[in-house]
Image (spheres, rainbow, N blue to C red):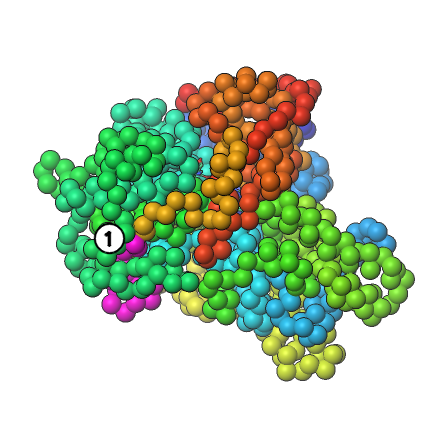
Amino acid sequence: MAYKRQVGRLPIIPADAQEHNVTCHYCIVGCGYKAYTWPVNRQGGTDPSQNKFGVNLAEQQPIDTEAWYAPSMYNVVKQNGRDVHLVVKPDVNCVVNGGLGSIRGARMAENRPSKVTGTQQQRLSDPLVWRNGVWQPTSWDDALDLVARVTARVITEGSEDDLVVSMFDHGGSAGGYENTWGTGKLYFESMKVKNARIHNRPAYMSEVHSSRDMGVDELNYAYEDYQLTDTIFIVGANPMETQTNLYLNHMVKGLQNGARMVVMDPRRTLTVASSEQFAGKDNVLHLAIKEGTDVAALNTIMTHIVDQGWTDKDFIAASTYQDGVAVPQDEAHPASLGSLEHAMQQIRMSLAEGAEICGVSADDLARAAEWIAKPKDDGSRRKCVMGYEKGIIWGNDNYRAVGALVNIALATGNIGREGGGVCRLGGHQEGYYRPSDAHVGRPAEYIDQFLIRGLGGVHHIWACDHYKTTLNASEFKRVHKRRSDMVKDAIDAAAGGSREQVVDAIMGAIRMGGLFVVDMDIIHSQIGQNAHVILPACESNEMNLTSMNGERRLRLSEKYMDRWGNSRPDCLIAAGIAQNMERVLREMGHDAYADQFKGYDWATEEDAFMDGYHKGNPEVTYERLRAMGNNGVQEPVVGFENGQLIGTPRLYTDGRFTRHGREDGKALFCASGWRGWQAPGKAREQAAHRFWINNVRANIFWQNQFLDQKNDFIQDRYPHPFVEMNPDDMVELGLNPGDLIEIVNANGVTQGMAYPLPTIKRNTVAMVFGSPAGSQGNVVNPGVNELVLPDYKHCWGDIRKISNATAQTAGISFKSHEVVL
Ligand SMILES: Nc1nc2c(c(=O)[nH]1)N[C@H]1C(S)=C(S)[C@@H](COP(=O)(O)OP(=O)(O)OC[C@H]3O[C@@H](n4cnc5c(=O)[nH]c(N)nc54)[C@H](O)[C@@H]3O)O[C@H]1N2
Ligand SMILES: Nc1nc2c(c(=O)[nH]1)N[C@H]1C(S)=C(S)[C@@H](COP(=O)(O)OP(=O)(O)OC[C@H]3O[C@@H](n4cnc5c(=O)[nH]c(N)nc54)[C@H](O)[C@@H]3O)O[C@H]1N2
Ligand code: SF4
Ligand SMILES: [Mo]
């Protein structure tokens, strides 16, 4: 972004600029933004009649004015073939963010591709096919024909089980109801692909099986519940950095209204540090448990609540199952489910026992239970809203840990009520609409291991980069590269041959253990280095896209600029694959099979939306969503009256729980007994190495930095993944700030930059995950739970110095990340 560092002034948005509704396409929170565009040859003026804000810009503006925008919110992009100015700024009227941006969302404009300002030149503009040792740009017809020919040969000579698919299941960019439907229809309706995995985990299943099995959908509250509650209980999440405006616009307001906060996280997070500043230290309780001991801590809190009689007896009687075991423990259920009494037989843990296992005091565990559930002096119930995310989802014993938390919410009647809720804080926005995935089975196939074992012949990859983000990544990369290189070599050897000859050569390599790789992405990613065909997608706002946020708020984020080059929406790429499959299969004489690939005659993303989501939700159309603006409507949509879609602010207000499909509507408790390290190899690794390699997200980065890896504003700050370390550990290892280090264990090696943080516990580090300059997943072992949920967060290693700080790292600030607000 160097070009803007010299910019002294930016154009004023004219009064007649076009206005578009935008939902930030990064995190789950889904903040509302407005995009303004106008012709590049003019700008507004200071007179109120001449600018979009309608104010006199010749005067000094008040401190909280809306009438400004930052350089990062500006760019010049193409719209209908013409250059236009673009400003994307937070929408003050959106109830989600109330005008707040974040360091990620407020850079949406500067991260648009532009020929004029030179931003994001890395974006893919044309399909690429591996030819003669390079990725050669080509037409869609040529690329899709090759994809279809190889895929059709593989699944007809073998079976659909030989097609392996990695696919996003989220909203925001690289997702949304349009794109999950496009890919879902292709792989789950036209085909019944069962060797599929989701972008962030090595199999196709839920992140929160236990909550659903208990009857509780994981997004059941409204964000305003944080402002209506007495206590905010955060488990394994760091919302200040990862759900930033949910934290700033809702949780902070709750704290300012007098709510207390309990945070269960082995690490002192910025959420703890900043909440102490907003609420006072006495109102924030940090349970700095030993890593992986959440089940024990939650069970101890639950036991104390039950023993003190602080449960909500009326709610339990009316809304939860009463008769012992409802679902026994088996292969598909890592714990039994049933009545409170049944669950307590497994859960019971005294304060002393819990304190011993978790490494926090019995007093603190008792205080957490009090803050969550002890009735107030007047006898009224305390309200508590509970939020959790990757610290337990990618933690020890996922099924039981999530179940143990939902148990507390059920026992205290904190679901379906104002100021309550037990919810994932979430990752991306949601946008899941697909045909049934029941054929995948439970437990699902562990896809990474399937590929490592040499199985599968074709790999379709949609919007994910396992090189940076999977577990056991060192081995995965070695095998994936070796297998795809076999196919590259075969293509190179067949150079100059006809399409049939090249496909025959590819098939020969596949039979020898090779893997044909097709990558759908917006850039040439690291796993894309293994691809033989790369298909360029466009992002949200280069297409219309619908998604819902963490309180199920559904919005249409509008297209305001042209697609980059010949890129296409993912749903239309899926349609193109389907159409080519139909043609090729027919040519091969498989007419009946070819017929399964009919029904993709979509000209636009709206057609895909109408074919999928709209059919299941007939009230919802683009036109109606557009009219609902940035505040949208909370799903499920239950009607349409007076020009408005009618939504549902909270789930389960009637006390009936249905997510598990039980007709009695009774929620089940989870017998979430503590069983130590659940995933294979974890306990052994912990004993063998000095440092716990906690891996975390940071405010400044979005995911694997795909749009930031060429952005010098970001790269000048952290040219290498930061590895936060206690200064005393650094002294012992002879490390100075900015020194480059290696993290080593039996799984592999990764590298980063030592970053001192006085408040981090000794012998633990916090490394930012997913960096292109050092993949934390290299050192994560392959251990998963019974349902193939990975435990990314728990990994141990030793640290050694590679080099002194480089010229680049020596120049950056090593101030504590714990800033005073
Ligand atoms: N060690 C460790 N590993 C983890 C985690 C962890 O906490 N620790 N967390 C896990 C989690 S929760 C997640 S979500 C994953 C993330 O893992 P990934 O999904 O692999 O990572 P992303 O950075 O989200 O990758 C997005 C890719 O999609 C591309 N893309 C962006 N927009 C579009 C689009 O519109 N269409 C297409 N086709 N492509 C697009 C980007 O260029 C990028 O290459 O990592 C997981 N891995
Ligand atoms: N800035 C930013 N925001 C994001 C993202 C991003 O890349 N950047 N990604 C989005 C995505 S896809 C996701 S999934 C979410 C993830 O959102 P979060 O889950 O909030 O993020 P993480 O930093 O991965 O992990 C949260 C915490 O888990 C803690 N933890 C580690 N081990 C344990 C344990 O054993 N027990 C407990 N209780 N805690 C533990 C870590 O110390 C860390 O503070 O963030 C979303 N928001
Ligand atoms: S908090 Fe999330 S949705 Fe909101 S602007 Fe930041 S990244 Fe976007
Ligand atoms: Mo995620």
Let me know if residue 554 appears in the view: yes
Q: Is residue 191 above or below residue 142?
A: below
Q: Residues within 10 Å of mark 1 (few under 14, many from 20)?
A: few
**The N terminus sits in image quarter:** top right
Q: Is residue 30 visible?
A: no
Q: Is residue 778 above or below residue 429?
A: above
Snapshot quadrant of residue 108: top right
Identity, as a three-letter code, of the amino acid under mark 1: Gln
The structure residue drawn at horizontal position 72% and vertical position 64%, both measured from the top left corner, is 147
List x then y, in percent, for residue 586: 71, 79
Percent across and percent down for residue 759 are: 43, 23
Residues 767 and 247: in front is 767
Q: Is residue 474 left or right of residue 233?
A: right
Residue lying farthest to the left in this orientation: 378
Q: Which residue occupies 54% across, 17% down?
A: 731
Q: How many marks?
A: 1
Region rendered in magenta: 657-671
Q: Is residue 717 left or right of residue 261?
A: right
Side of 618 relative to 224 (left or right): right
Inspect the magenta stretch and tell me whether residue 658 lies in it.
yes
Q: Which residue is mark 1?
A: 345
Q: Nearer the viewer, residue 504 or 40?
A: 504
Q: Residue at x 74, y 79 (%)?
A: 588
